Image (cartoon, rainbow, N blue to C red):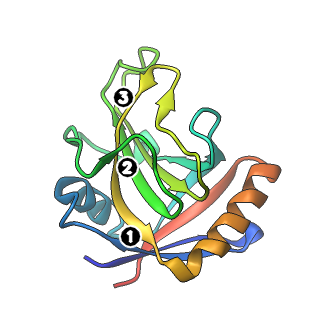
Amino acid sequence: MTTIRITHGPSGLDALATMIPEKAPANAAFLWRYLETPRVVPGIHAMWTGPEISCPIPAAHLSNEPALPPENATLHPQPGDIVLAYVPARMWGGNPDPIFDIGLFYGPGARMFFPIGWLAGSVVAQVRPEDRVNLADACGKIRRAGACEITFERVA
């Protein structure tokens, strides 16, 4: 378990992120298993958390996933952090499915604040420093263009 690639052609997003399983073992293992095959997930600029592209994992991609514990938790993600947020079933608006969200944080001033309040997320990976300018530029384009589809895949 080492590296994932995050891409979105129209914005030019192409970033490599290094997994950090030593800091978030259960969360990193979940994401690594999820990416056994490349995944295309919806992406949209977050409304409450600041400089983040939120990528909620579709419920159809999941089957009876266990609850994720908070690990390497943060309330204030840093640029380049890949944060896995978990919300139990029925907690947010009565949604019957748990929510698993991959957050791409690209700028300073981010916060894990939602309509339901503060929710610590687990930092599971970090975009390589040399890819962070591309990440910020591409995420800015996604912000201006609206909803999109982002591809996540294992590299090594």
Q: CA distance from mark 2 to mark 1?
A: 18 Å
- 3 lies left or right of 114: left
Q: Which mark is residue 91?
A: none
**Mark sitting earlier along the chain (3/2):** 2
The percent coordinates of residue 125 (x first, y second) are 37, 65
Taking the spot 30% from the left edge, 28% from the top edge, the residue there is 88
Residue 1: name its quadrant.
Answer: bottom left
Q: Of all residues shown, which one is farthest toward the top?
A: 94
Work out whether 135 lies above or below 97: below
Between 59 and 47, the residue placed more toward the observer is 47
Tag 1: residue type? Thr
Q: Secondary structure at mark 1?
A: loop
Question: What amino acid type should be assigned to the residue bearing mark 2?
Answer: Leu
Q: Nearer the viewer, residue 59 or 93?
A: 93
Q: Secondary structure at mark 2?
A: strand
How busy is the neighbourhood of tag 2: few (under 14 within 10 Å), some, or many (20 plus)? many
Three-letter amino acid code at the position of disc 3? Asp
Residue 91 position (above or below residue 60): above
Sequence-first tag of 1 and 3: 1
| Left or right: 10 as drawn, with respect to 16 | right
Mark 2 sits on what residue?
84
Residue, disc 3: 97
The residue that mark 1 highlights is: 37
Name which residue lies at 78% across and 60% down: 141
